[in-house]
DNA sequence: GCGTCGATGGCA
DNA sequence: GCCATCGACGCG
């Protein structure tokens, strides 16, 4: 399986979020390889998007979001959960994709149904903020055999974002039971 | 099977 | 004071 390279990430966040569904996230840690298929992701499309952290300007926290695509943006929420994002778009555009849910592979039995659960199981923490995802530690692979049935929905937990709260910027695989807050069913 | 609520800390 | 969350609890 081929790795996702820089060019894959250098596209607008909505396109990237869509195309990340069905790809495989890989974490190499202490000689082992932990893998899971991404089934849900949200796009945060830049400073104009009131749900996007970069809409409050360039700060120490959001600095990596304004940097090159394909790097990790990891931040703490509610004092206890790390959120894993992938920086998208062109340099300085301030976009990212939040990885919300995945299905474990290789008989790895964990619950990855939610952004906080996913980072906990993958041991993704703020220490990895800014990490290059085209490197050797944490990266993604194409799976040409995977044909997800991709649907769109509203993003979760962004009720404060004015007219941006209802935008269909969440993408998920309709065939997965790991997807959170499903609007259908 | 619901809805409600507390934990817990960084950020603006 | 809020927050891109989760899990425990109380219902009946």
Image (cartoon, coloured by chain):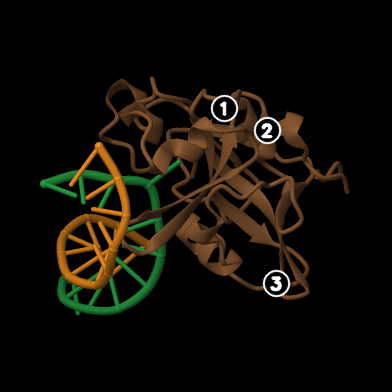
Chain colours: A brown, B orange, C green
Q: Position of residue A16 (x, y in %)?
A: 64, 31
* Residue nearest the viewer, comparing A54 with A160: A54
Q: Which mark is residue A181?
A: none
Q: Is residue A5 visible?
A: yes
* Residue nearest the viewer, comparing A67 with C2: A67
Which residue bears the numbered disc 1? Answer: A14
Q: Are marks 3 and 1 on the same chain?
A: yes
> Which chain's residue wears label 1?
A
Between marks 1 and 2, how big is the CA–CA gap?
11 Å
Query: Which label sits in the foreground, 1 or 2?
Result: 2
Disc with the residue nearer the chain's start (3 vs 2) = 2
Q: Residue at x 56, y 47 (%)?
A: A130
Q: Secondary structure at mark 3?
A: loop
Q: Toward which corner of the image does residue A162 lie, by quadrant? A: top left
C4 on left or right of A180: left
Q: Are marks 3 and 2 on the same chain?
A: yes
Which residue bears the numbered disc 3? Answer: A108
Between marks 3 and 1, how big is the CA–CA gap?
29 Å
Query: Which label sits in the foreground, 3 or 2?
Result: 2
Q: Position of residue A165 (x, y in %)?
A: 34, 29
């Amino acid at each position: 399986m081929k790795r996702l390279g820089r060019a894959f990430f250098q596209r607008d966040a909505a396109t990237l979020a869509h195309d990340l569904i069905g790809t495989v996230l890989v974490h190499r840690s202490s000689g082992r390889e932990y893998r899971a298929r991404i089934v849900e992701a949200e796009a945060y499309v830049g400073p104009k998007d009131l749900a996007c952290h970069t809409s409050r300007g360039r700060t120490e926290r959001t600095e990596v979001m304004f940097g090159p695509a394909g790097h990790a943006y990891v931040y703490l929420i509610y004092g206890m959960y790390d959120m894993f994002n992938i920086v998208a778009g062109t340099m300085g555009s301030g976009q990212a994709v939040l990885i919300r849910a995945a299905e474990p592979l290789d008989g790895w039995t964990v619950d990855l149904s939610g952004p906080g659960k996913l980072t906990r199981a993958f041991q993704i923490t703020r220490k990895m903020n800014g990490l290059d995802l085209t490197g050797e530690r944490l990266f993604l692979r194409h799976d040409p055999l995977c044909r997800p049935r991709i649907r769109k929905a509203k993003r979760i937990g962004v009720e404060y974002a004015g007219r941006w709260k209802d935008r269909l910027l969440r993408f998920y695989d309709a065939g997965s039971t790991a997807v959170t807050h499903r609007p259908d069913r």
